[in-house]
Amino acid sequence: MSYETRPVQKEVDILGSRNRQPDDFHAVIKLLETRRFPVEGAVSMVVPLEEAAGALRSWAENPSRYKKFMVSLD
């Protein structure tokens, strides 16, 4: 078996939420459900899973253009 070696171009850390209690998550979910959370101001784009690779490329090419992007698993 042969492996192609390529230099590392960019490293991406994907972090989950931590150090929060279940009540914190319930409060955030309620804000989202009632549409009181300003998603438009916090999330630059929402993409389906199939488009996540392209979104990562766009972010890597111009990181200052994006605050956050969300991958939808619907």
Image (cartoon, rainbow, N blue to C red):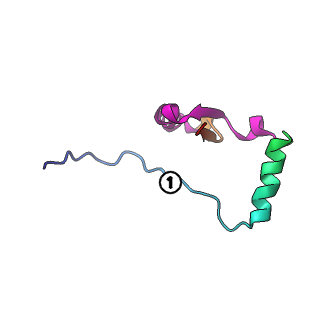
CA neighbours of label 1 inside 10 A, class few (<14), some (14 to 19), many (20+): few
Q: Residue furthest front?
A: 74
Residue 49: image location, x then y, percent: 52, 36
Residue type at mark 1 is Asp
* Position in image of residue 48 (x %, y %): 56, 33
Please name the residue shown 22% across and 47% down the image.
5
Q: Which residues are magenta?
A: 37-63
Taking depth in this image into account, of 10 and 51 the one nearest to the observer is: 51
Q: Is residue 52 left or right of residue 38?
A: left
Q: How many marks?
A: 1
Q: Is residue 37 visible?
A: no
Q: Is residue 71 magenta?
A: no
**Residue 26, image x, y percentages:** 79, 57
**Farthest residue toward the left?**
1
Residue in the picture at 29% in, 47% down:
7
Q: Which residue occupies the foreground of this view, 50 or 3?
A: 50
Quadrant containing the C terminus is top right
- Residue tagged by mark 1? 13
Q: Is residue 30 above or below residue 69?
A: below
Tag 1's secondary structure? Answer: loop
Is residue 45 found inside the magenta-colored segment of the image?
Answer: yes
Say whether residue 11 is left or right of residue 6. Answer: right
Image point (80%, 63%), residue name: 23
Q: Residue at x 78, y 61 (%)?
A: 24
Give x and y (percent) for residue 8. 34, 48
Q: Is residue 73 left or right of residue 39?
A: left
Residue 66 in sight: yes
For the stretch drawn in magenta, the main secondary structure is helix
